[in-house]
Amino acid sequence: MTRSARSPLQRRLSQAVLLALAPLATAPVFAEDSSSSATTLDGIVVKGERAEGYSVRRTSAGTRFDLAPREIPQSVSIISHQRIEDQNLDDIIDVLNNTTGVTSTQSDTERTEFYARGFYIDSYQFDGLPTQMVQNWSYGDSGLDLALYDRVEIVRGATGLLTGAGNPSASVNLIRKHADSAELTGSVSVNVGSWGRTRTTVDVTTPLNASGSVRGRVIGSYLDTEAQMDNYDQHKTLGYAVIDADLTPDTQLSVGYDYQQKRANGATWGGFPMVYSDGTRTNYSTAFLANPEWTYWDTTSKRAFATLEHAFANAWKFKIGATHDKTTANDKLFYPFYSALDRNTGAGVTPMAGLYNTQRKVTGVDGYIDGPFQLFGREHQFMAGLSYNKRDFANYGDFQSGWTGLPSYPADLAGFPEPDWADVLPLQSDGTITQKAAYAAARLSLADPLKLILGARYSDWENDSREGTVAQRFSHKVTTPYAGLVYEIDPVWSTYASYTEIFQPQTLRAKNGSYLDPVDGKSYEVGVKGAWFDDRLNASLSVFRIEQDNVGQATDDKVDGNENQTAYIAARGTVSRGFEFELNGELKPGWNASFGASRYVAKDVNGTDINTRLPQTAIKAFTSYTPQQLEELTVGGGVNWQNGIYYAVAGVGRVEQDSYALVSAFARYRLAPQFSVQVNLNNLLDKKYYAQIGAYGGYGDGRNGSITFNWSF
């Protein structure tokens, strides 16, 4: 958004934020001098950090303390709203694919898995409330629409202090948009692009009383698109409403609801074969869809949330948030099992299919207090909270196989008939997973340039579930430590060291029948950070090592009393080490840029590389520039490069994907103060590459583009 396009209120809000050293979007404004005053404009209590360009000046990511990025003893990436707009990022897949140190792979058209430092990312937060997302039954989590989120914060490494159970990879925090205007404001955008794509988004904020102390915001979006694959189309509907109220100058209440539905026709389960039985590579067209026409994968999520926060006169604050969401998935899928696909005849495919109905309900509550205290003549900070998360799930399904096979593959694939489904879908798995936790941390000022953060989380984790007819009932009580030391070298540079942990429960059993203790993820990290231009530009260089302990390892024994179940022992697991570099923010007025480079090596206890389908080296860069002499025009572009990867196909050989780069560009022109047009081009070089590599494959998108028309008021 150029300067001329902002309303007078928006300009005053931005100026107030720049002067206030504002914290997180949901936290009251407190500087380190313990000032508790809030800035009030036209009935609005300005609370929180609003991104300027590609960076934020302060965030509570990773610690809950309101800190500048260079004061956080872990690697943190921010994908701001401006970056989302410039790159036309639609969903969480787009965001994480453009995040430093994060890589992804697909299982099929609807499931994308994300990894950091070699480990799967399953820890997510919504406005700081922790939850876990898993892809095995696919509730559509990887397709979350970004229209309702202001920015995304990613903390890499173990994040057990605030997230509880998970992997030592990263935590992804999605920060919602709120009603932050006491005047009627809004926008309407229409995006049209390749493969028949149309996306319309309406975003309106309005005061709900005369003073503007109660405000509402409504966002609606609809996407209708086909794809480079034949016979595939996708439809996404989003609705979001939030009410923000200043109950008093020091007390704020936020209540909201969002609805997201995705319908994907022609969805794959798996993909196409990567190799023939003679070891030669297949070479299908990028338009090829390995699916009959009757397949689909539909998901719906409904999420209600509320947040209450209060600032006390002594510079302490209290915040509590609650959420409840219900997610369902309905899918009818075809699974072509490639036992040995003959290159000449197309024989060797066993057709399988599944009809599934899955349901998940999540209830979460998290409340904490934080503020300053005096000790030994110095000011320190303390934070403590309680957290509760309950996840109920039930997965029903009918799996069919063994009926009349394909005459040849892929001949007549689109018209391949459906099997006869069961009248009533049998229950495959269900259960409840509950986490109760207490956490606390202190940020101690050991000296003017030296800060030490010490913390811990006590988690009571319970699993009461069934897989088929097998009951799984067990619990773990785990204490997760956190320690980080930050030394400020000068007003620009700081260096840090941190030790963090996280735990991941497992369902494997020892010989005596007991469940193994959780996998323990330990993260060691040292680095240096810099900040310029009043924290508008941030840089970080980190070196890390991650270790896993208590990983289940199969033995030759059976579980006592069950000759069909293999017994496991706890052993040392994967060790990952590497480095990450990131430069993000405003290089000079009008010029924003993000550059990230990452490298890791992850090996198991036998010294074998893990997850060879993931790139170990990646570079991600993007920039935008608005000339001061022509503020109506913004241009930019970027490149994402990754090294080669491979996957070993049993009995055939290994499939390789060479290194490749995806180049993008965009231009935006403001035709009038309230009207702009933007063009985005992706994969300019039209690189043909695998986005899914394994026993099954899938291509990434070829060259494509879109035009966005935006009207703001």
Image (tube, helix red, strand yellow):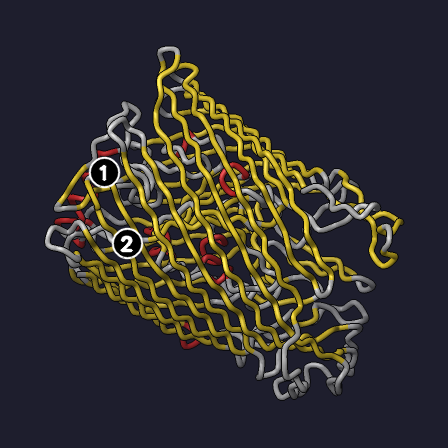
Give the quadrant of residue 493: top left
In the displayed structure image, the side of residue 458 where residue 69 appears, left or right: left
Q: Residue at x 54, y 66 (%)?
A: 359
Q: Is residue 620 visible?
A: no
Give the quadrant of residue 549: top right
Q: Nearer the viewer, residue 424 or 151?
A: 424
The x, y position of residue 283, in whole percent, is 66, 72
Q: Nearer the viewer, residue 55 or 248?
A: 248
In the displayed structure image, the side of residue 245 where residue 293 appears, left or right: right
Q: Amino acid at mark 2?
A: Thr
Q: How many marks?
A: 2
Q: Nearer the viewer, residue 418 or 244?
A: 244
Q: Amino acid at mark 1?
A: Asp
Mark number for residue 250?
1
In the displayed structure image, the side of residue 629 where residue 428 appears, left or right: right
Between the C-alphas of marks 1 and 2, the distance is 39 Å
Look at the image and tell me in which quarter the C terminus lies: bottom left
The x, y position of residue 441, in whole percent, is 46, 29
- Give SS at disc 1: loop
Q: Nearer the viewer, residue 148 or 287?
A: 148
What residue is shown with label 2?
634
- Which one is in front in this view, the residue at disc 1 or the one at disc 2? 1
The x, y position of residue 329, in whole percent, is 53, 70
The x, y position of residue 179, in whole percent, is 25, 53
Q: Residue furthest left?
A: 210
